Amino acid sequence: MRLLADHPHGRVSFVETRHLALLDRPIEARGELVYIPPDRLERHTREPREESAILDGDTLTLVRDGRRRAMSLRENPSVALLIGSLRAVLGGDRARLERDFTINHAGTPDAWILDLLPREPELTPALRRIHLVGRGGQVERVEMIETDGDRSVIEIGDARS
């Protein structure tokens, strides 16, 4: 967690692959992630279509087709938990993670794995676990595994300022 906290911000490319039981093949999206500590996280999808999700403090703003929609995380506890977990990982905030998740970890600082299991599954009934893989202070892969077997895998490129 210290290595993550010491690697405080940056821009990274991402490729997300969603595996859904209802579809014959996965759905892929590409774009850029931006983290500005302590509480700004942006996801700008470029393919297959332009859209953005910008989290600033407690407000999540979705931008698609020129329309903006803002929502408060206080009104959406399951979204708040998911996004909060990502911010806590990126910020190296172990105390916050332990509040919401049981943490299992393995590896060394050079190659690590972190599994997050929700402490209160009723808050995120669709989420079974979050599996992260990284090296040093950088997250390289995030896998969200849902209770119905669907999963999302995000491969993250090298950080740049």
Image (cartoon, rainbow, N blue to C red):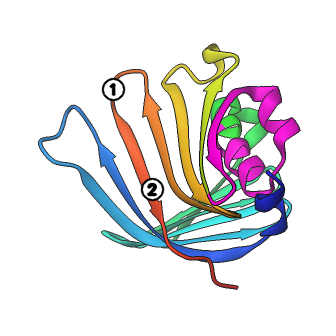
Tell me what residue is drawn at x 26 percent, y 53 percent: 27
* Residue 69: x %, y % from top left: 61, 57
In this orientation, which residue lies closer to the viewer: 38 or 90? 90
Q: Residues within 10 Å of mark 1 (few under 14, many from 20)?
A: few
Residue 76, picture quadrant: top right
Residue 5, picture quadrant: bottom right
Amino acid type shown at disc 1 = Gly
Residue 102 colored magenta?
yes
The numbered mark at residue 149 is 1
Tell me what residue is drawn at x 81 percent, y 49 percent: 58
* Number of dots carrying numbers: 2
| Mark 1 secondary-structure assignment | loop
Q: Which residues are magenta?
A: 82-110
Amino acid type shown at disc 2 = Ile
As drawn, the residue found furthest toward the bottom would be 161
| Mark 2 secondary-structure assignment | strand
Cα distance, mark 2 to mark 1?
A: 16 Å
The numbered mark at residue 154 is 2
